[in-house]
Amino acid sequence: MVSTLAWLQGPDRAMAQSDMTWRELAPENLAYMELVLAGGETGTVIIELNPRFAPETVKQFRRLASEGFYRGLSFYRVIDGFVA
């Protein structure tokens, strides 16, 4: 469902995997979430949804997001192999 994730903090700053290949993104497949970190910093997470791989999951995610389901929920960064 999700193929690209970037964290934007402040104007024109993006932190992402250094090995990520940048390409043009289809606007209709993007979801934007405003986040507030524990320290009070704010930023925007851009999530690229890929309906070709999981059309029903993408549809469900969009519905939940538009209804405000994720508002106020905690999100955690998962790093493969970091915490077992």
Image (tube, rainbow, N blue to C red):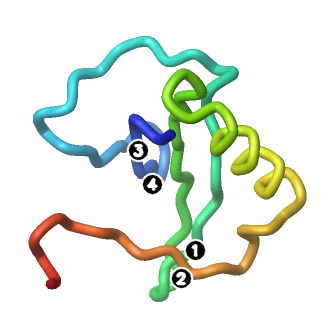
The front one of 78 and 43 is 78
| Marks 3/4: CA–CA distance | 13 Å
**Residue that carries the numbered disc 2 in the rendered image:** 40
- Which residue appears at 53% of the width and 29% of the height? 50
Pick the residue in front: 36 or 4: 4
Q: Which numbered dot is residue 5? A: 3
Give me the C-alpha separation between circle 2 and circle 3.
Answer: 21 Å
Mark 4 / mark 2, whichever is N-terminal: 4
Mark sitting on residue 9: 4
Amino acid at the residue labelled 4: Gln
Please state which of the two labelled residues, at mark 2 or mark 1, is closer to the viewer: 1
- The x and y percentages for residue 11 are 48, 43
Task: Please report the residue visible at 16 percent of the width from the left and 83 percent of the height from the top.
Answer: 83
Residue type highlighted by circle 2: Gly
Give the image location of residue 66, x and y in percent: 85, 51
Disc number at residue 36? 1
- Whichever of callouts 2 and 3 sits on the residue coming sooner in the sequence is 3
Contact (Cβ within 8 Å) of mark 1 with mark 3:
no
What's the residue type where badge 1 is placed?
Answer: Val
SS for callout 2: loop
Q: Is residue 2 left or right of residue 60?
A: left
The percent position of residue 59, horizontal first and vertical second, equals 74, 39
**Which quadrant: the C terminus?**
bottom left
